[in-house]
């Protein structure tokens, strides 16, 4: 089952007593070839897991940085099928790094859940995060994914109360994604002191690792989160590098992977600093 890759990775991280570094990039940004280069380079740069966004015209949970990435990808004709092609090309050279697709429900409905799940499994995808799919309406998607061994990873937020939590963690596997701030990606900063009790509550409810994202832009913030969570997710800070490198005519891949390496080192050493 493909989701075993996620379970194995978190078990290895636990054995090493460190958090994972999860890197997010958008499929097709700034173009398909460069996106694949970046994707292939992320594990060596220190990414323990990778989230690969598939572009959508109305990414409601995203801040300006990832909105623009989605627009660039769509302008370059990237699609959900194109995203699966990228995943397949990545998996040909890497059998170990968990790969999670992240996006919105509309493209999945258009493709059909069963067809998507089969194609995603064949491409080597391990998990899926769907930002705008309420748990109450997720059973058909969950059925399709579970049949192919793909984890449906749910989002919890600071507004997820005790009454809502059981619905959020039901049929979740792989890990739970904690949205550390109320709002969109890449705008506010995560507060590790506020994150810590939320992570404990989610771990207890789901009996799964908890990854924290949406508010981590700097190495310092990544390290703070890595001390209290099972993984730190960084997206906007990496996507910013793609955009700025394009404007400055710099090597996009090199710039993104350099930033990823800086963040990964901070996450990997975070708990050593407290010993």
Image: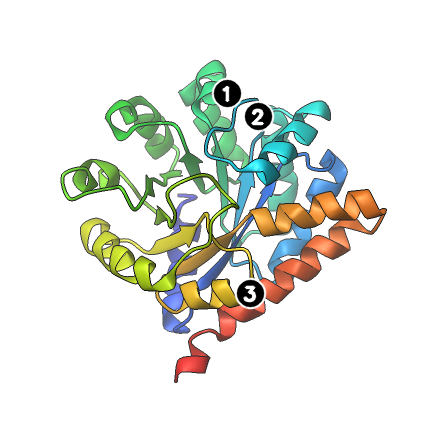
Q: Quadrant of the C terminus?
A: bottom left
Seen from the viewer's position, the closer of residues 44 and 164 is 164
Nearest the camera: 252 or 12? 252
Residue 219, numbered circle = 3
Alpha-carbon span between mark 3 and mark 1: 33 Å
The residue under the point 69% across, 53% down is 256
Q: Which residue is mark 2?
A: 80
**Vertically, is 145 above or below 191?**
above
Question: At 21% from the left edge and 55% from the top edge, which residue is drawn?
Answer: 201
Query: Is residue 99 or residue 60 the one in the foreground?
Result: 60
Q: Residue furthest left?
A: 163
Left or right of 148? Residue 262 is right
Q: Earlier in the sequence, mark 2 or mark 1?
A: 2
Q: In the rendering, which numbered label is found on residue 175?
A: none
Is the residue marked by circle 1 packed among few (<14), some (14-19), or many (20+) residues within 10 Å?
A: some
Q: Which image quarter: residue 77?
A: top right
């Amino acid at each position: 089952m493909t989701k075993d890759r996620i379970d194995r990775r978190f078990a290895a991280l636990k054995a090493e007593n460190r958090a994972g570094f999860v890197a997010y990039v958008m499929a097709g940004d700034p173009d398909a070839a460069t996106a694949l280069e970046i994707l292939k380079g992320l594990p060596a740069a220190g990414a323990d897991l990778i989230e690969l966004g598939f572009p959508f015209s109305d990414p409601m949970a995203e801040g300006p940085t990832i909105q623009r990435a989605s627009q660039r990808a769509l302008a370059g004709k990237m699609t959900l099928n194109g995203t699966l092609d990228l995943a397949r090309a990545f998996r040909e050279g890497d059998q170990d790094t968990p790969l999670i697709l992240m996006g919105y429900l509309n493209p999945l409905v258009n493709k059909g859940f069963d067809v998507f799940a089969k194609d995603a499994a064949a491409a080597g995808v391990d998990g899926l995060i769907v930002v705008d799919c309420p748990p109450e309406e997720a059973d058909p998607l969950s059925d399709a994914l579970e049949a192919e061994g793909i984890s449906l990873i749910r989002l919890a937020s600071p507004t997820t109360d005790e009454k809502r939590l059981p619905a959020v963690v039901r049929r979740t596997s792989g890990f739970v994604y904690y949205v550390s701030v109320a709002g969109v990606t890449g705008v506010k900063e995560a507060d590790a002191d506020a994150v810590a009790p939320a992570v404990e509550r989610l771990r207890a409810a789901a009996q799964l690792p908890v990854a924290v994202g949406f508010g981590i832009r700097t190495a310092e913030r990544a390290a703070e989160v890595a001390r209290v969570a099972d993984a730190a997710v960084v997206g906007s800070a990496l996507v910013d590098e793609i955009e700025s490198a394009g404007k400055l005519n710099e090597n996009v891949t090199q710039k993104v992977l350099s930033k990823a390496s800086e963040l990964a080192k901070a996450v990997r050493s975070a708990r050593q600093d407290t010993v």
